[in-house]
Image (tube, rainbow, N blue to C red):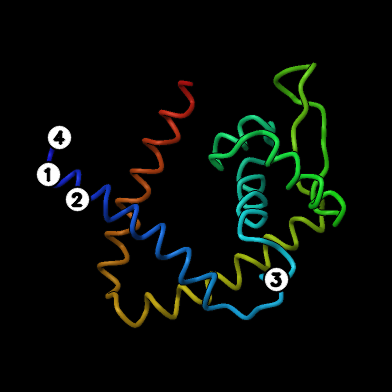
Amino acid sequence: MNKKLCEAVELFEEVIMYGTERVIRSFEHQIFEEYSSEQLQMLQIISKSGHISPGKLASLQGVHKSAISNRYKKLETKGLVTIVDSEEDLRGKSITLTNKGHDVVSLFNEVIYEHVEKIVLNDFHEKEIDEFLRIFRKLSSILKTEGDLE
């Protein structure tokens, strides 16, 4: 495998792993006391997809469907998610956010973006941010297209 590509993948993994840990550890916001990082990630995924099957959600979070079921039940009890009939499969069900769920995701995004902005603005120039955006837009497009083939 290409050495530069290997290094890029390793760096990406480090950024995801350490970045997530640093961001979540550094917060003393109430949202992180009410919801686990796994629950917040689940809400984010549902928000981005609009509605998603429990199986696809389990795949994206890298867990068994039973973990999704447990998270779903806790979030449903809090009024953040609900089950709807799947648009793709008449027998299937999808998870979607309630209005309250959308509010929690908006608050989470606001808290995260403010924190990341402080980190990024201190250490990155505008041209570096533009380059970062260009690369990640391209990577996102490739990964979404690849995911559509499955």
Q: Residues within 10 Å of mark 1 (few under 14, many from 20)?
A: few
* The disc label shown at residue 7, or none: 2
Task: Describe the element under mark 1 as helix, strand or loop.
Answer: helix
User: Do residues under tags 4 and 1 come within 8 Å of each other at their CB atoms?
Assistant: yes
- 22 relative position to 31: left or right: left
* The disc label shown at residue 56, or none: none
Task: Describe the element under mark 3 as helix, strand or loop.
Answer: helix
Frontmost residue, 63 versus 89: 63
Kindly identify the amino acid type of the residue bearing the numbered disc 1: Lys
User: Do residues under tags 3 and 2 come within 8 Å of each other at their CB atoms?
Assistant: no
Horizontal and vertical percent position of residue 59? 56, 34
Residue labelled with disc 3: 31
Distance from Cα at disc 3 to Cα at disc 4: 42 Å
Task: Describe the element under mark 2 as helix, strand or loop.
Answer: helix
Horizontal and vertical percent position of residue 7? 19, 50
Residue labelled with disc 1: 3
* The disc label shown at residue 1, or none: 4
User: Do residues under tags 2 and 1 come within 8 Å of each other at their CB atoms?
Assistant: yes
- 45 relative position to 85: left or right: left
- 69 relative position to 23: left or right: right
Distance from Cα at disc 2 to Cα at disc 1: 6 Å
Kindly identify the amino acid type of the residue bearing the numbered disc 4: Met
Task: Describe the element under mark 4 as helix, strand or loop.
Answer: loop
Question: The N terminus appears in which quarter of the rendering?
Answer: top left
The residue lying at 62 percent from left, 54 percent from top is 38
